[in-house]
Amino acid sequence: MIAIALSGWWSDRVGRRKPFIYVATVFMVIGLAMPLLLPDLTGMILMSVINGVGFGLYMSVDAALMTEVLPSEGTSAGKDLGILNVATNIPQALSPSIAALIIGTFGGYPVLFVFGIVFAILAAIATAPIRSVK
């Protein structure tokens, strides 16, 4: 919660979004690597704390970034905001099933953390082409 409040405020203050997305990705990658480096309770606790900060950073700034890429004219903004809502919620709904498939097919939880690291990096790379937002 602290990361959400501080990063949203700071991002608004400096008028930039992408650097916060990239920093959040670094936090999430480090957090997801913790159970691989320390495969015990300590690794899981560290993952939770570090990933929590990274995800808080990401969510506040990502929501701002999404609203800034919407068209400002016309009536399609509401429809586009609805599409963004669906695009945000469907992956969250499908994640448990996909995680179970990864864990069962590819060799357990360590592979799941590797998948998480790869997709966090890919998500950050996907924001690079956005030119209308700094």
Image (cartoon, grey):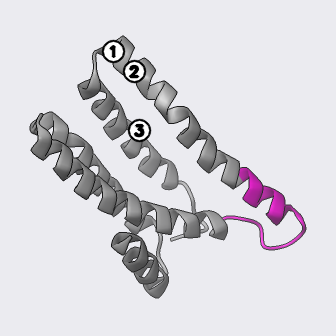
Q: Which residue is mark 3?
A: 119
Residue nearer the viewer, 91 or 1: 1
**Residue 97: % across, % down:** 50, 26
Q: Which residue is mark 2?
A: 102
Q: Earlier in the sequence, mark 2 or mark 3?
A: 2
**Residue 99: % across, % down:** 42, 27
Q: Separation of disc 1 and disc 3 at Cα?
A: 16 Å
Q: Quadrant of residue 71?
A: bottom right
Kindly indicate whether the residue at mark 1 contacts the one at mark 2 (C-beta within 8 angstroms): yes
Residue nearer the viewer, 101 or 128: 101
Q: Which residue is mark 1?
A: 106
- Is any part of residue 133 visible from this angle? yes
Residue at 41% in and 71% down: 4
Q: The magenta stretch spans which residues?
A: 69-83
Q: Is residue 80 above or below residue 10?
A: above
Q: How many marks?
A: 3
Given the image, on which type of amino acid does mark 3 rest?
Phe
Q: Secondary structure at mark 3?
A: helix
Q: Earlier in the sequence, mark 1 or mark 3?
A: 1
